[in-house]
Amino acid sequence: MSLKRILTCITPFVLIPFISAYQATGETVTWVTVEGTGSMVNAKKDEARVRALEDARFNAFHEAVLSGISAESLVVNFKLSGNLTGAIPYCRITDKKILNEGIERINIKGEDEPVPVYKVKIKAGVIQETESTSPEFSINSSLNKLRFTDGDTIHLNVQTTRDCYIAVFNIMENNKVIKLLPNTFKKNILISKKNPLSFPDEHDLKNGISLVAHIPDGKKSVTEMFYVLALNTPLALRESDIQEGIYHRYDGQTAFFSDLVKEVAGIPHNERAESIISYQIIK
């Protein structure tokens, strides 16, 4: 997809040497040993430690249950069942033990000298829950068409069954993801069931924001996806390198869909509804 982009990049760190599972109180607990880091650049030690623990939590989710989930698997699930229920489970940590922690200096892309980070290593027990979403909270998304020619304008409509906040991501053929909504200009997208989301709307177009189908050089056709997330509260992504997709052309330096999955897995099913649309772009 060709969009005008604003880009930021923060490099993630992870080490996963151990996984095991057992049954406890009727739930399957998967034990993983993971690391997490928090940058100390412009941050105090306590702040960096909190970020490192949060990073380790997300890494534990990924290693325990999410490593096999891809954009393609969501499309398959959607085609088979008509919805995304259970495709991304809700993950929570039932217990954890800090194995070691401390400050280290590491090399980060774009930095001339090693920078200080707070690093923690934990052993965590992860439980996944796959209960159904609330029948009163659902989402329906559609595009102006499902097969575009290079250069066509793309338009997205989103209808929900109750008032909620919306986030929209574009998943590219290489499983990399960019965030379209919210963005620098629309920070909290609150819609009602009576007023569906139209993106881009007239105000967006007046500000030069548009969605244009684009095929990378050397390709004759590509298949991409929109992943739409409806939430009870505004989306709050942790520090990640999911790029924003407004006003600057995408440069390839963004996160993978698996990184987004880790974010979504921390949101209970009764607090989210999801939709995915697969479309094709041809020459």
Image (cartoon, rainbow, N blue to C red):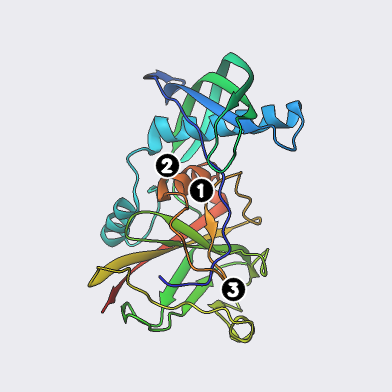
The residue lying at 66 percent from left, 55 percent from top is 233
Seen from the viewer's position, the closer of residues 282 and 25 is 282
Q: Position of residue 261 (x, y in %)?
A: 45, 46
The residue lying at 34 percent from left, 48 percent from top is 70
Q: Amino acid at mark 3?
A: Lys
Label drawn at residue 269: 1
The residue carrying pointer 3 sits among few (fewer than 14), some (14 to 19) or many (20 or more) residues within 10 Å by Cα, namely some
Q: Give the residue pinned by disc 3.
A: 193
Q: Amino acid at mark 1?
A: His
Circle nearer the N terminus (2, 3) = 2
Circle nearer the N terminus (1, 3) = 3
Label drawn at residue 130: 2
* Left or right, residue 86 beside residue 117: left
Gap between marks 2 and 3, in whole Å? 26 Å
* Left or right, residue 156 beside residue 244: left
Identify the secondary structure beneath mark 2.
loop
Can the viewer see residue 135 in this picture?
Answer: no
* Left or right, residue 132 beside residue 107: left
Seen from the viewer's position, the closer of residues 211 and 219 is 219
Q: Position of residue 148 (x, y in %)?
A: 32, 80
Seen from the viewer's position, the closer of residues 274 and 221 is 221
Gap between marks 1 and 2, in whole Å? 8 Å
Q: Amino acid at mark 2?
A: Thr
Kindly check if marks 1 and 2 are in contact, taking CB atoms under 8 A apart as contact.
yes
